[in-house]
Amino acid sequence: MIIQFHKARAGKHLMVLGAFASTFLGSGASAATQGTLGATSTGTVAINASVANRARITGLVDVNFNAVDPSTNASAVQNVCVWSNTATGRYTITASGGGSPSAFTLTGGIPYAVEWAASGGQSSGTALTSGTASASLTSAATNQSCSTLSTLSASLIVRIASTDLLTMTAGTGYAGTLTLLVTPL
């Protein structure tokens, strides 16, 4: 096959080829350099990487209210680790209960309340509404397991009011599930 360019058309063909290359290879200047013909040839390429926003919650333990005095409010506090790889460490927490529809209830319709604090060691926090994301929070965790903090990065507080405990029957088990969704910002 013989390909010939006529001088009059050569400029037009090169312009079309340049437009093709710009369209398919990107409009920005490439950092790659091409090698030249020789005994050896060296070329270089730029390597770029980024990661998506990620979060992790760990350190959770089951909440057990065993043989509590129904004449006083019951509360359970646990320190947990919430980590976000964003530059600010920001996240939201969304809690959902196992009741209908996603209510914070135990079997028999016994309600409980959920609070969240964005630091460990807290005995109270901001009340969460089932299925609704919290306001923006910031984690102090510098790694996924909070192993470099003396305390964990958040507090989960679960409460059952005395008025609800008094409706429960002694010796009967009441159970529920709480789901916590962490979303990095």
Image (tube, grey):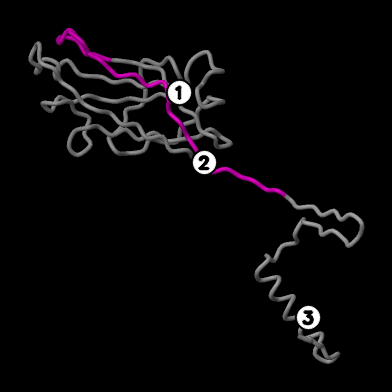
The one nearer the camera, 43 or 109, is 43
Q: Quadrant of residue 36?
A: bottom right
The one nearer the camera, 57 or 20, is 20
Q: Residue at x 32, y 28 (%)?
A: 127
Mark 1 Cα within 10 Å, few/some/many (few <14, many 20+)?
Answer: many
Comparing labels 1 and 3, the label whose residue is closer to the camera: 3
Q: As shown in the figure, which amino acid type bears the numbered disc 2?
A: Asn
The segment highlighted magenta reads 47-75
Could you tell me which secondary element the residue under label 2 belongs to?
loop
Percent of width and height locating residue 37? 89, 62
Mark sitting earlier along the chain (1/2): 2
Mark 2 Cα within 10 Å, few/some/many (few <14, many 20+)?
Answer: few
Percent of width and height locating residue 154? 43, 22
Q: Quadrant of residue 68?
A: top left
Spatial CA span between label 1 and label 2 = 17 Å
Q: Which residue is mark 3?
A: 14
Could you tell me which secondary element the residue under label 1 belongs to?
strand
Q: As shown in the figure, which amino acid type bears the numbered disc 1?
A: Cys
Spatial CA span between label 1 and label 3 = 60 Å
Most distant residue in the right direction: 39
Q: Which residue is mark 2?
A: 53
Percent of width and height locating residue 134? 38, 35
Q: Which residue is mark 1?
A: 81
Give the position of the N terminus as an image quadrant: bottom right
